[in-house]
Amino acid sequence: MARSRAERRLPNHRRLLQAQGLAIIVMAVLGFAVGGQKAAISAATGGLICLLPNLYFVWRVGSQRAGRHARRFVSIFYRAEAGKFGLTVALFALVFVTVPPSNPAFFFGAYVAVHLMHWLAPWLLRD
């Protein structure tokens, strides 16, 4: 039986995740150039707080093939999104308790820069 066109053309999230990783590297290098090693570590930490939950989300949604069961897919999607949100909150709490960022501007700047890579998703996920 032939697979439908929608099933064959699943989005490749690898490019989006690579763009987010590149944003972390750029912000860390910029932080190192402007504020030294502590600013670079703050930028890398802020970026990873955004990237790691996104990796979790892609893993959870990508590992489940709901097929034609829309209700099951929506359930998987919402659970993955809730897990992503919880992981983001937990990572923020973990960082603020254990290693407070020495340069909050680069910490939050990198978080926002990585998060804004989603705006490029339609361009990055196209064939």
Image (cartoon, rainbow, N blue to C red):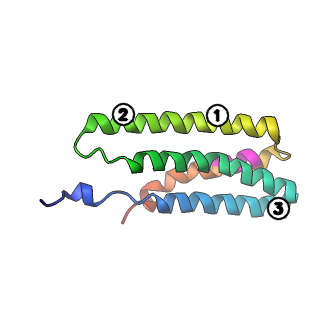
The boundaries of the magenta stretch are 107-112
Q: Answer with left or right where residue 70 lies relative to residue 111.
A: left
From the image, tell me which residue sits under label 3. Answer: 32
Residue in the image at 21% along x and 59% along y: 5
Q: Secondary structure at mark 3?
A: helix
Residue 47 drawn at (x, y percent): 67, 51
In which quadrant of the rendered view does residue 18 lie?
bottom right
Count of numbered circles on the image: 3
Is 106 above or below relative to 126? Answer: above
Q: Rounded to the nearest whole Å, what is the CA distance between mark 2 and mark 3?
A: 42 Å
In the image, what residue type sits under mark 2? Answer: Ser
From the image, tell me which residue sits under label 1. Answer: 89
Residue 38 drawn at (x, y percent): 86, 54
Label 1 crowd bin: few (<14), some (14–19), many (20+), radius 10 Å: few
Which tag is nearer the camera, tag 3 or tag 1? Answer: 1
Residue 89 drawn at (x, y percent): 64, 34
Q: Is residue 108 magenta?
A: yes
In the image, what residue type sits under mark 1? Answer: Val
Q: Quadrant of the C terminus?
A: bottom left
Using the image as rendered, state which of residue 123 and residue 58 is in the foreground: 58
In the image, what residue type sits under mark 3? Answer: Phe
Q: Answer with left or right where residue 77 lies relative to residue 5.
A: right
Pointer 1 or 2: first along the chain:
2
Residue in the image at 75% along x and 53% along y: 43
Q: Rounded to the nearest whole Å, what is the CA distance between mark 3 and mark 1?
A: 26 Å
Q: Secondary structure at mark 1?
A: helix
From the image, tell me which residue sits under label 2. Answer: 75
Secondary structure mainly formed by the magenta segment = helix
Pointer 3 or 1: first along the chain:
3
Residue 94 drawn at (x, y percent): 73, 37
Is 86 above or below relative to 65? Answer: above
Residue in the image at 50% along x and 51% along y: 119
